[in-house]
Amino acid sequence: MSPNRLGEGEGAIRRERILSFTFDGKRYTGHPGDTLASALLAAGVRVVGRSFKYHRPRGILTAGSEEPNALVELRTGARREPNTRATVVELFDGLEALSQNRWPSLLVDFGAINSLLSPIFIAGFYYKTFMWPAAFWEKVYEPAIRRAAGLGRASLEADPDTYEKAHAFCDLLVVGGGPAGLAAALAAGRAGARVILCDEDFLLGGRLNGDRHEIDGKGGGHWARQIAEELASLPEVRVMTRITVFGAYDGNTFGALERVADHLPVPAAHQPRQRLWKIVARRTVLAAGALERPIVFGGNDRPGVMLASAVRTYVNRFRVTPGRRTAVFTTCDDGWKTVFDLLDARVDVPVVVDARREIPAALANEASRRGLRVMLGAQILDAHGAKGVGAIDVRDERGRTLRIAADALAVAGGWSPNAALSTHLGGRPQWSDAIHAHVPGDLPRGMIAVGGAAGDFSLAGALRAGAAAGLEAARAAGFEAPAQSPPRVDDEAVGCAPLWFVAGARGKAFVDPQHDVTIKDVAVATREGFQSAELLKRYTTLGMGTDQGKTSALNGHALVAALTGRAPSDLGTIASRPPYTPVAIGALAGMHRGAAFKPCRLTPSHRWAQSRGATFVDLGEWRRAKAFPLEGERDWKRTLVREVRGVRTGVGVCDVSTLGKIDVQGPDAGIFLDRVYANVMSSLPVGKARYGIMLREDGIVFDDGTVAHLAPGHFLLSTTSAHAVKVLQHLEHARQVLWPELDVQLASVTEQWAQFAVAGPRSRALLERLLRGAVDVSNAAFPYVACAEFQWQGRPARLFRISFSGELAYELAVPSTWGDATVRAIMTAGEDLGVVPYGMEALGTMRIEKGHLAGAELNGTTTAHDLGLGRMMSVQKDYIGRVLAGRPGLCAPDRPALIGVKPSRLDAKITAGAHFLRIGARPSLANDEGFVSSVTFSPTLGHWIGLGLLSGGPKRIGERVRAHDPLSGGDVEVEVEVVNPVFYDPDGKRLRD
Amino acid sequence: MRIECPFCGERDVSEFAYLGDAGYRRPPADSQGLAERFYEAVYLRENPAGPHQELWYHAAGCLSWLRVTRNTRTHEIIAVGLATQAPGS
Amino acid sequence: MRYSIFSLLRQALAGHRGWEPAWRDAEPKPAYDVIIVGGGGHGLATAHYLAKVHGITDVAVLEKGWIGLGNAGRNTTIIRSNYLLAGNNPFYELSMRLWEGLEQDLNYNTMVSQRGVLNLYHSDSQRDSYVRRGNAMRMHGVDAELLNARDVRRMLPFLDFENARFPIQGGLLQPRGGTARHDAVVWGYARAASGRGVDIVQNCEVTGFLREGGRIVGVRTSRGDISARKVGMAVAGNTSSVARLAGVRLPIESHVLQAFVSEAVKPLIPCVVTYGAGHFYVSQSDKGGLVFGGNIDGYNSYAQRGNLPTVEDVCESGMALMPAIGRVRILRSWGGIMDMSMDGSPIIDRTPVEGLYLNGGWCYGGFKATPASGYCFAHLLARDEPHEVARAYRLDRFAAGRLLDEKGQGPQPNLH
């Protein structure tokens, strides 16, 4: 069952427990500590995926998050995760994985026919064909391309798991828990600094787990566990595993994704699947190690070809070998570690092919001591084998080619620092001739790179630099930190001669295996002029796969360089962009989805409205009662008519608490209000309220509302519900930035006060009963636009005689915690007066009947003149918006201005969004004369009415025009008569009585 | 990005609303060529690639308007002060 | 060489050794009739139409880096002409018509895919404003359809219809909207322009302007002085900086807009969808990646990168709209620098300095405008008068109060 599991040695798996899992429906077993990749390798599964374009069989190339090939669909149903890298999936009992991008099965994939067409499917071929006939692109070509492309399948069901967000602050963030990172965390932690160490693996130690190092005479893995224990004992140190620091952002902020439950079948109860961390760090040690590069040769994508360091990881950590006859192809000393580790694990190494003509004597001696077949100055031309490597063709130093049987091949092309995080803020890596790769260039402030991430590939160097960086960070945070002697380790050879690709391969040689970019593709791109790093990437898609070219980009650059006679560094670099490894969209969204997407603000009377069977409507964040249908009242129009008539003939009550309320106090309050309102407010006597409009500085109407002068130096403004926050910001700007010399203070009191409109001819009677003399509401004592502050039932209350409905009306305000009790008291007091609760539908209808403005008219493009409010613009004072409102374009006489419309045939319906056309005019933009902004069925008039903005405005009252609406599906054309926008009680007698 | 509010301390950028160029001066009502001056003040804002004086509003905090000097190439915050205080004071 | 399946087959047989550079990497000449500053989509399109429509081929496109790596290569590839205002709608519809014939015009497959653009609405007032907009589109002969929730569900069954904070009520669909392959647009225009004799000069940064009297007579560049009868700027994102070299101040701010692409998945989203209750728009590329974005970060920036709050905001909206994508992973994010104008609409006009012409202020709508922008800018450069559909894009409209403010946000660039 596990033909490739090595017999002896524990590595980091726990053999005593057996975990069962399936891949493509077939059952396998593994152990705790395995990844899906190591368990599949152990089971002898070689083909785990199919490539993007040619559907070539692919195996496992790496043992880490840089994996380009081994992508699977993990889990099933709503939890299906496409494109999951088998190399980072921690094995759990019951795991289910499917191979992807194949049909009908992984081993028999019809898509592989693309491989036969590969001579045509060259880089950029899409751009050169599929152009004829033009109509075929969407109908024929593109659907076929889309079906063939894509990798795994996303679930169509809502993600059932939850995601959390967390914040953390520290003196030092250590990215990477390998030797350098551990040394850094330890040095800073011992000094007392607040340290956070993050590692993407589930096991600390980095390469110490994959390699066989000795530190202070102990195994590297053992040392790592010992350090981890000490770190765990330090109170200011937090060590996290299964967490990837994926992005560096401004202000020393880092994004990190913790995989809380990805190693479990389902998250534990009340636990999220993943947690997004936002970490603010004074200092950062980038100890993310390095990534090994493959070498490009023919058939280098065949299952069984693996990075040499990955082979070591599988052998040493997981006790698995990719093959029983594993050849090694290297161009650096590091590859030899794989040779000896394989041999020590009793795996046959049929040949070591080292592209260098000379190697260190120690390696050569050891090789000869072990009787190894070594070919120096040689290269592997091609790997053969349909479903995995079976043999390799080696070209020796004299140019002869010979075939050698091998069922796996370890490839060591040298290491590139893993410096992605150092470039997220714009830093560009620099080329290093010493290591033939890019090293971090100008790092973000506060960040230092150490160990492999800095291009220092020796263990001693990593430990030393890590400890030094940790000390420095601790000292910078104000901690005393004595230097400590570094642990003792052996020197190791890290020599490397670059070899990027092998010329003369016969088979397809893949530079980017995930996107099937071959040497030929790069050659064509080069020929066509796509020679800079960015253009090459875009034209060939090299490096645009899920692995972001971690193992392929530099080889591609080196290839272009060779083809154009330049050095790899001449191509420039590609800035790495966040995230370092892909991050689930759900994790970035966190809790704010579904009903919790945005807050839901409830009015003070919400529970009462619910108890009355109200229907509700969401207006921005507010949820307001839409209507109060009586039992059996199924038709919305019947409810509307009843509520409107109830108000117009009796009395109604409506919660208007959502209107913004801003308290303005101070000796200069009046002057301040004069400057922010277009009309004069300073003349408003105490005890009176006034309607006002605010303009933006560009002269457009910003908001409208009332200003109540409650007491000397004390005003209360109301704003529209939608603009409450924006108006406060605007006023604070005026107060703090424009006129800081004015002695005036502002406070939002929207949430503090519940406010109810009590409207209708019987509203006075109701309030008399309710208030019982707390305030005299008679017309004489409390006329239209009066306002008062008073005590009612031992609590503060406010009353305003203002009306949105057009009836005699009051608005009563009480502290919001008393809102519920107050609305119930209003209902009780009005019971025998026939008081009706009314909702937004009735409110909206009555405001249209009265020609009052709402969001559809105050739409950010209308002037006071457009809205019939031009006379409100004071000529006696300066105010925001005065000057620019006078620009010619805003004063043009043909601007659309507010009018009312009613259908010529009274049974016709008008729709909002219809455009006005002159009778007989062809529908065109040139003939467009404006639009219908708001409509309602008017219960009072018995037909549909609307407000609109019509070119020429009120001058055209009496004219007939067409309301043109081809879109809504009703009558395309309705003839309407232009009328006064105030349909009901135009003289305002009712509200003054 | 993090901004050090003089009242609230260093806070994440998500707490702030942005207005832009802090050089905005509302022309006095009695100045000459008012229309032109207002046009310039409202529409022609500074937009440098480099250090920029700009107004931020601590919307999810103390509601202070802040005068922030920030490098638009690097997003580095160079200085923060209250808008009620004249620049430089 | 003409591109076709036949040339491709011929080359396949010849080992693809005969392909030529898609465009000439030209050395700058000392003088040109017209210099276009900026080798993005708009600049290259301008050069193409100058040569093709107006016969002006003594043209150089100067690019400070490599062509197409600014906003042309950093957008979410959406094309549409669903505009409300009479000053905008005909312009974008011209662009749409040019998109529809672009492959044949350029002999380059720019993968124009008219798979539909759907704007969702979630309230009655939002529906009313979409009706208004859709009717404006219809009145100009642009396709527009109003969908109800049932229609939307049929198209996109995996959206959140059950548990949404702001339930989907319907949408405004422009069936002819869709996407195009952004890089291919750049390369196609470059190749076509180059083929007509236009010089595309890369790694040539404009550092100043040459003047004679009050007039601009050329540019100073990192590769020497180059004179020209007319100089056109098509450097959106950096318009303020380049214009400042000529002493011109503009009603434009530079802001960063982030965009995102997910790992490739099998076909999921058939059209372009925009959420109406938050900032989120998404489509799926032919390669399978979900390409999406949201609001600008909101502060002036030239950094070509943004911050996490916006990333989170975009993803929240994405998850609120389509909770099935929770386990799809973001592969890459990036930022582009937008020329945010003060009313949200672009400027194609002469500048106060004679000889200098402006094409900018595209906000985040520049990609879809590429063909018409090039077409109209070429018209302006060739004839010194605005093209009929770009008449409203005047620089003096701000001072005159003839604004083109589709959203009604006023002179606050980060709100457009």
Image (cartoon, helix red, strand yellow):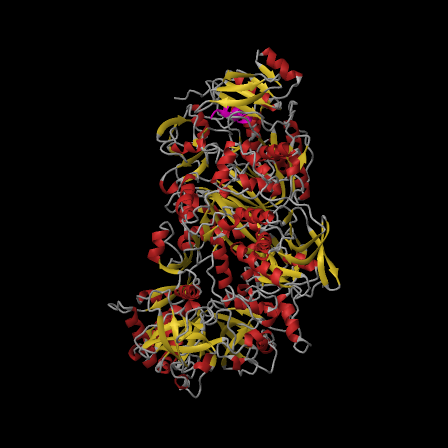
* Residue A616 percent across, percent down from the top left: 35, 64
In this rendering, the answer to whether A115 lies above or below C377 is above
Is A625 on the left-hand or right-hand side of C346?
Answer: left
Is C338 on the left-hand or right-hand side of C141?
Answer: right
In the rendered structure, does residue A304 fall within the stretch colored magenta? Answer: yes
The foreground one among C266 and A77 is C266
Q: Give the farthest residue toward the right.
A: C213
The part of the chain drawn in magenta is A303-314
Q: Give the farthest residue toward the bottom.
A: A780
Which quadrant is the N terminus of chain C positioned in?
top right
In this rendering, the answer to whether A59 lies above or below A942 is above
Is A42 on the left-hand or right-hand side of A198?
Answer: left
In the rendered structure, does residue A421 fall within the stretch colored magenta? Answer: no
* Residue A529 percent across, percent down from the top left: 60, 40
* Residue A769 percent across, percent down from the top left: 35, 80
Q: Quadrant of residue A800?
A: bottom left
* Residue A47 percent across, percent down from the top left: 43, 27
